[in-house]
Image (cartoon, rainbow, N blue to C red):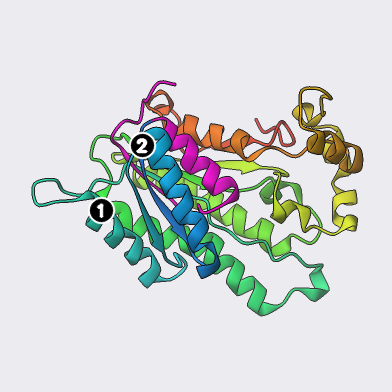
Amino acid sequence: MSRVLEGKLAIVTGSSRGIGAAIAENLASKGSNVILNYTSASSASLASNLAKSLETQHGIRTSVVQADIGTPEGSARVIEAAKAAFASGDKPLQIDIIVNNAGVALNAWLPDIKLADFQETYRVNVLGPLLLVQAAQPYLPLDRSGRIVNLSSVSSSTGFVTQTVYGGSKAALEAMTRTWARELAERATVNAINPGPVEGPMYAANPAEVKDSIRGWIQHTPLMAARPGVDSDEAVQAARDGGGRPATTKEIAGIVGMLCTPDAAWCTGQVVCANGGMVMLH
């Protein structure tokens, strides 16, 4: 694979596992150094092991930082870690790529939504990316070569049941994406992607009634049709149970990686499909 991101520096939030880890792997395979971020102490060993793996397999440099980006202190800690690992007296810090991947989904039917769940969802999914981009802005490139990718969701536009709060938070993130694309135009492109169901615990945790409610969407999503003998046995079984297979984390990471390359320089302010065709927008 061409190392089109050779020597660049990427921050990937929530990157100890799942989609975040796959994004870090994709960027590292293209030559980018990576700052891996996680929040919970239980993720420390996962992040450390991933860092070692990326360095060994791809010959890049990593830094691992535990920080809650939904607080000013946490976002500042990520930038300080970047300075400590990648800046020196004659080489100022430059942050080339930011992937706002960290997020939470605290789903509930309308009568059951709790104030604390609303506040936590917006703190992590909306305030977190805002604080990190604020903290990183002075270190973005000055030649439009920077890349910011925000992970939204099809839930921002589909109205899935139980996702009043989660869908709303992702719609807010998309609105911020468009504003940042204008405000940061001389520094970086800013785009979002909108995955649908993706393999992993977040999708698996949905109750059966919620999965049943989106079955029709899945059955009409072009790329979710499972292919026995091509897709994994798990994906084929998931298709039988849910109407179609979820995306793999690598498939989502591939779209993020594409948006981070020089070839994506003429794309900004967009919500780019990462859902197999579940949502088709003009």
Q: Toward which corner of the image does residue 107 lie, by quadrant?
A: bottom right
On the image, the x and y values in percent for residue 20 come to 53, 48
Please say if 169 is above or below 27: below
Secondary element at image label 1:
helix
Q: Is residue 219 visible?
A: yes
In the picture as drawn, the residue positioned furthest to the bottom comes out as: 115
> In the image, which residues are magenta?
1-30
Please say if 173 is above or below 269: below
In the image, 72 versus 63, the foreground residue is: 63
Q: Which mark is residue 85?
A: 1
Q: Would you name the residue on which mark 2 appears?
A: 32
Q: Is residue 13 visible?
A: no
Instruction: Tell me the CA gap for discs 2 and 1.
Output: 14 Å
Query: What type is the residue that disc 1 sits on?
Result: Ala
In the picture as drawn, the residue positioned furthest to the left comes out as: 90
On the image, the x and y values in percent for residue 255 come to 55, 33
In the image, 139 versus 250, the foreground residue is: 250
